[in-house]
């Protein structure tokens, strides 16, 4: 009995497991309806189709030749290098240099970029004024502006402000006050006074017009000299000044050499009149340098090396004593020569005394043991003394 019951339960479970569940039946009906009444395709067939499609779209083998032809890269290293450079450029882009229509635009840009805005604006304002006034006719209305701008440019280095210019202008062209008739003024006398005032005002205005015409020419000249600040590479101002001094020295040296070539010994001759009324001695002293001495002096003043040699000690140090002596003599030459003539005269008179002469009275000789000076030699050559 028990065996029969066990067999019935087993058959019932097996039958239930093989039959489709209610859930599976509902899903199958939904798929049937969604497919338009067609049964779903076999999954095995779909899988095989997908596998065949993937196999048919396999990507081609990579070839570097394409990049070589298009970009000129010969190796992956070349490509990597250029890509890195492009990335670096992108991270730090270089600003493109601006283009200018003319040199003035470039100068304006450079000056403003260098922080000289005030100078630029001042020059542009002056330029605008100059353009307006130099292209306008001189009239009563424009004369004031022309004269004031001319004064402003003329006295710029003196530091005159706009108020200073206005003050100076007002003083130069101050108009007298128009007379007002009083209750006690005679009609004819007042008319004469007013007419005189009108003539004075007309005279001042006419003079102002003339001055404005002259000033307009000055403004036209100033317009051509008005330039923007020059912006260049930073330079050593001391070196620039040194070069400027060097150029000026060279120029002066050339001018001096050219002028010295026009001189000769006679150009620097010395003439002095000596007059001793007490002793009745009077003569004209004249000295003309010899050619050799003149040539040596010319070398000293034209050749810096010769100049250094003259005023240098044997050890190379500067001979200030000689320089002082030469300077003093050049500044007091006539005085020294006159004093030398006096001393020579006195020595000559003493030599004529009996106790100071080996040849008796009238010998006119130097005292014994006295070496004649250069001046005495010149005077002997001139026949003044023996």
Image (cartoon, rainbow, N blue to C red):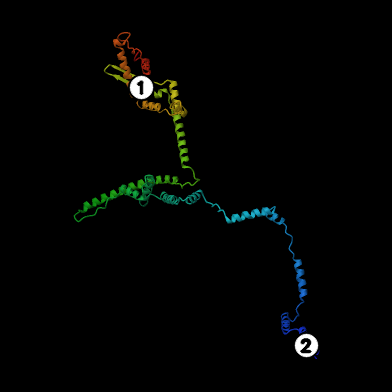
- Indicate the position of residue 82 as horizontal and vertical percent values: 64, 54
Of marks 2 and 1, which one's residue comes earlier in the chain? Answer: 2
Residue 272: image location, x then y, percent: 34, 22
Q: Residues within 10 Å of mark 2 (few under 14, many from 20)?
A: few
Residue to which mark 1 is pinned? 271
Task: Count all numbered tags in the image, as a single digit.
Answer: 2
* Residue holding disc 2: 9
| Residue at the far front in the pictured view | 2
Nearer to the camera, 201 or 25: 25
Q: Check disc 1 and report its element: helix, strand or loop.
A: strand
Q: Is any atom of residue 290 visible in this view?
A: yes
Q: Position of residue 309 (x, y in %)?
A: 45, 26
Residue 261 shows in this picture: no
Q: Can you say which quadrant of the picture contains the N terminus?
A: bottom right
Q: Residue furthest left?
A: 184
Q: Is residue 358 above or below residue 188?
A: above
Quarter of the image that includes the C terminus: top left
Callout 2–callout 1 Cβ contact below 8 Å: no
Residue at x-position 77% and y-position 74%: 44
Q: Secondary structure at mark 2?
A: helix
User: Where does the image place residue 115, in percent across and percent down from the top left?
Assistant: 46, 51
Q: Residue furthest bottom?
A: 1
Residue 53: quarter of image: bottom right
The Cα–Cα distance between marks 2 and 1, rounded to whole angstroms, is 170 Å
**Above or below, 372 relative to 45:** above
Indicate whether 214 appears above or below 373. below
Is residue 190 toward the left or the right of residue 25 in the image? Answer: left
Of 17 and 173, nearer the camera is: 17
- Rendered residue at 34%/22% (across/down): 337
Q: Nearer the viewer, residue 156 or 301?
A: 301
């Amino acid at each position: 009995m028990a065996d029969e019951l066990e067999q019935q339960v087993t058959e019932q479970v097996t039958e239930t497991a093989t039959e489709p569940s209610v859930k599976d039946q509902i899903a199958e009906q939904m798929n049937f309806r969604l497919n338009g009444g067609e049964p779903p395709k076999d999954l095995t067939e779909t899988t095989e189709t997908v596998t065949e499609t993937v196999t048919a779209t396999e990507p081609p083998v990579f070839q570097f030749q394409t990049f070589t032809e298009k970009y000129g890269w010969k190796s992956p290293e070349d490509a990597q290098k250029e890509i890195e450079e492009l990335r670096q450029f992108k991270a730090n882009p270089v600003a493109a240099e601006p283009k200018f229509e003319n040199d003035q635009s470039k100068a304006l840009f450079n000056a403003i970029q260098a922080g000289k805005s005030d100078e630029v604006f001042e020059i542009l304002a002056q330029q605008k004024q100059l353009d307006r006034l130099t292209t306008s006719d001189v009239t009563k209305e424009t004369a004031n502006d022309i004269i004031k701008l001319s004064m402003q440019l003329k006295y710029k280095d003196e530091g005159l402000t706009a108020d200073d210019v206005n003050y100076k202008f007002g003083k130069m062209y101050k108009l007298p006050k128009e007379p007002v008739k009083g209750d006690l003024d005679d009609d004819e006398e007042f008319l004469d006074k007013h007419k005189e005032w009108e003539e004075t005002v007309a005279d001042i205005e006419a003079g102002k017009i003339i001055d404005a015409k002259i000033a307009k020419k000055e403004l036209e000249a100033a317009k051509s000299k008005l330039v923007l600040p020059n912006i260049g590479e930073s330079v050593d101002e001391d070196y620039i000044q040194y070069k400027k001094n060097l150029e000026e020295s060279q120029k002066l040296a050339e001018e001096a050499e050219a002028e010295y070539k026009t001189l000769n010994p006679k150009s620097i001759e010395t003439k002095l009149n000596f007059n001793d009324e007490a002793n009745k001695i009077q003569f004209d002293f004249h000295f003309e340098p010899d050619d050799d001495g003149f040539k040596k002096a010319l070398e000293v003043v034209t050749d810096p090396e010769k100049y250094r040699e003259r005023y240098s000690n044997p050890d190379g140090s500067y001979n200030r004593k000689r320089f002082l002596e030469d300077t003093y003599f050049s500044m007091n030459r006539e005085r020294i020569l006159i004093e030398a003539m006096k001393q020579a005269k006195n020595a000559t008179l003493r030599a004529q005394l009996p106790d100071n002469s080996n040849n008796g009275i009238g010998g006119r000789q130097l005292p014994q043991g006295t070496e004649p000076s250069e001046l005495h030699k010149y005077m002997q050559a001139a026949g003044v003394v023996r």
